[in-house]
Image (cartoon, rainbow, N blue to C red):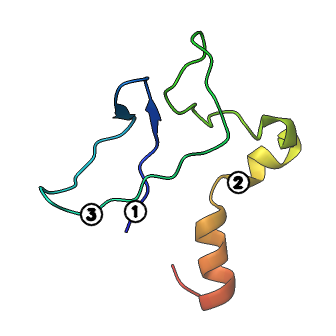
Amino acid sequence: MYAVPAYYDGTMVQPLEKLTAKSNQRIIITVMDEFITPNESIRPRSMRGALAQYTNPALIEKEEGVWERALVEKHDYL
């Protein structure tokens, strides 16, 4: 079972992602109490940059090579 975001355009339900249901396959439609406005984008928004407010520039340099260092410290590997 999986969920596919969609909206009702007044006539039909319009999926926002590819729907891979087969012919005669049962589906469940859940009607939510949320509405979109005509000017609002109905496509899912990108999450790019959503956590930018938590960035610590002082730690960015330390991120380079962290995976390799962790392997050496924990497993004496590399």
The image quadrant that residue 77 belongs to is bottom right
Which image quarter is the N terminus in? Answer: bottom left
SS label for mark 2: helix
Q: What residue lies at 65% left-to-right and 71% top-to-bottom? A: 69
Residue 56's place in the image compared with 8, above or below, is below
Instruction: Assess whether mark 1 and mark 3 are in contact (beta carbons under 8 angstroms).
Output: no
Residue 48 relative to residue 54: left or right? left
Hey, what amino acid is under mark 3?
Answer: Arg
Instruction: Assess whether mark 2 and mark 1 are in contact (beta carbons under 8 angstroms).
Output: no
Q: Position of residue 7 (x, y in %)?
A: 47, 33
SS label for mark 1: loop
Q: Position of residue 20 (x, y in %)?
A: 22, 52
SS label for mark 3: loop
In front of the other: label 1 or label 2?
1
Q: Position of residue 61 (x, y in %)?
A: 75, 46
Outermost left residue: 23
Hey, what amino acid is under mark 1?
Answer: Tyr
